[in-house]
Image (cartoon, rainbow, N blue to C red):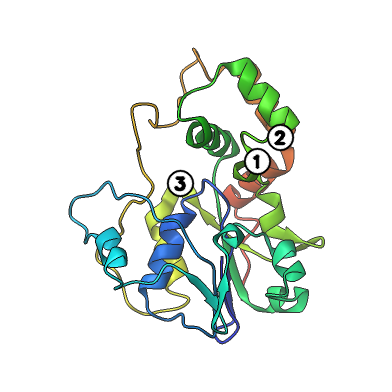
Amino acid sequence: MLISHRMKFAFFRVPKSGSTTMEFMLRMTGRFDDDDIVTGMQVGGFRQTNTPDFGDMIRRGKLGVNGMVNGHFVPADHMHLDPSQAIEEGYITQEQLEEYAVFTCVRHPLKRYISAFKHSQRRMPAPHLFVMSIEEKGSDLGLLTKPTHDYIYCNGVQVSDPLDFEVYQPELRRLLSHVSDFSFPVIPKMNGRRGPFMNDVPTDAHYWTPELKATVCEVFAKDVEIYDAMKAGELCLTH
């Protein structure tokens, strides 16, 4: 989560939507400082070999990773706060949310939730275990399956402009343009593959059956509506 009252800008991080890279690249613009609200973040690995070793830069103190607000530490577990929670923590108000340029990334619900499962368990679960967990919203998923709806709407009002995960690089560049006129020549890929089970989202009928798709779409019906509305061009906000 990043909030700059100075720039009237906010970015809220939906888990498993490419938000780590988005926040990191926002930090790389150099536009955020101790007067802004910047949560601590956990930085994973890079898959591309033609990018600088940002991890090494962090280890050597060249880039900060601790979150600060007015010189005080903001805990890393606040990185995925939604707008309502940010209001509760005193970081922003409803009025500011409706005035500022506010963004969050929207990913296809089916892909996002299976990615959350793979991230959580490092393996593909049996379909019945997947169904049980999303229906019960158990601790093995927890934060990873926070509804995207809670990031787009706050108190019944749409406050966030959606960024389409499926056209990631152009959308990330659109996000960056709101805080800086610098154009990064290369966008790295962070928190990528971490082992033999961290593959691309499966789409074959052997696992991703029509019944399983229907269950996910039913449990997360609001997020499906958000995704469809974004694709139809009905969610864009003009700030």
Q: Which residue is mark 2?
A: 137
Q: Which quadrant would residue 24 be assigned to in this image?
A: bottom left
Q: Which residue is mark 1?
A: 142
Number of numbered discs = 3
Q: Give the vertical position of 185 relative to 228 (above or below).
A: below
Q: Earlier in the sequence, mark 3 or mark 2?
A: 2
Q: Give the vertical position of 88 relative to 124 (above or below).
A: below
- Image coordinates of residue 198 in percent, x first then y, are 39, 32
Q: Amino acid at mark 1?
A: Gly
Q: Secondary structure at mark 2?
A: loop
How crowded is the residue under tag 2: few (<14 C-alpha within 10 Å), some, or many (20+)?
some
**What residue is drawn where x is 24% and y is 49%?**
48
What distance separates the C-alpha of mark 1 from that of mark 3? Answer: 24 Å
Q: Which residue is mark 3?
A: 166
What distance separates the C-alpha of mark 3 from that of mark 2? Answer: 26 Å
Q: Which quadrant would residue 155 be assigned to in this image?
A: bottom right
For the N terminus, the image quarter is: bottom right
Q: Amino acid at mark 3?
A: Glu
Left or right for 214, reference 74: right
Q: Are discs 3 and 2 less than 8 Å apart at CB?
A: no
Q: Earlier in the sequence, mark 1 or mark 3?
A: 1
Q: Secondary structure at mark 3?
A: helix
Q: Earlier in the sequence, mark 2 or mark 1?
A: 2
Q: Nearer the viewer, residue 48 or 221?
A: 48
- Image coordinates of residue 9 in percent, x first then y, are 57, 76
Q: Give the vertical position of 46 relative to 27 (above or below).
A: above
Query: Residue lying farthest left?
Result: 50
